[in-house]
Amino acid sequence: MRLQRHGSKKRPFYFVVVADARAPRDGKFIQKIGTYNPQTVPATIQLDRQKALEWLHKGAQPTDTVRRILSFKGVLYLKHLLRGVKLGLFDDATAMEKFTKWSTEHEAQIKKRQEEHRKSRYPGRREQGGPVRRPERKPEGDSNAQR
């Protein structure tokens, strides 16, 4: 499992793909399982969790970056929970409950980060979302007359 680079120069956009280790970086792949756009803040990641989980169970080895993406999306945590189910530590319902709880907390953190970024990027904006009004400028002719 690795990233396949697309996009123009200095504007990268990646596909998350499952490929043979011998294939070139942007060459032949087995299956596309998602996309990754590092240009947005926070980075936009769209991933098919089920496909990624199936490939991990089959023994696919993710690269370091893809491992972080899978961890961020919760695929590795879900794999960990399903291993616990397989070992008999808890049942399927408990595993899904734990994953759902983690997922809601994680989504809340992401929303919070997006809001903080939006506020830091546009500090002059009002909370209602309306445009910021500029104060009216005095006509230039009046200021020259007073000098």
Image (tube, grey):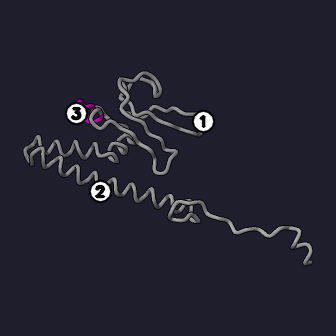
Where is residue 11? Give x, y as percent.
Answer: 57, 39
Q: Amino acid at mark 1?
A: Lys
In the figure, is residue 125 to the left or right of 1? right
Quadrant location, the N terminus: top left
How far is the residue under mark 1 from the one under mark 3?
Answer: 35 Å
Asked whether 119 or 56 is in front, the reply is 119
Q: Amino acid at mark 2?
A: Glu
Task: Assess whether residue 54 is covered by the magenta stretch.
Answer: yes
Helix, strand or loop under label 3: helix
Q: Residue at x 68, y 65 (%)?
A: 134
Helix, strand or loop under label 2: helix
Which residue ends up furthest to the top in the rendered image? 28
Which is nearer the N-term, disc 1 or disc 3?
1
On screen, residue 80 above or below 121 = above
Residue 105: mark: 2
Q: Which residues are magenta?
A: 52-58
Q: Residue at x 47, y 27 (%)?
A: 26
Q: Residue at x 9, y 43 (%)?
A: 87
Helix, strand or loop under label 1: loop
Label 3: few (<14), some or many (≥20) within 10 Å? few
Q: Residue at x 52, y 45 (%)?
A: 39
Which is nearer the N-term, disc 2 or disc 3?
3
Which residue ends up furthest to the left in the rendered image? 88
Residue named by callout 3: 57
Quadrant location, the C terminus: bottom right
Residue named by callout 1: 9
Which is nearer the N-term, disc 2 or disc 1?
1
Q: Amino acid at mark 3?
A: His
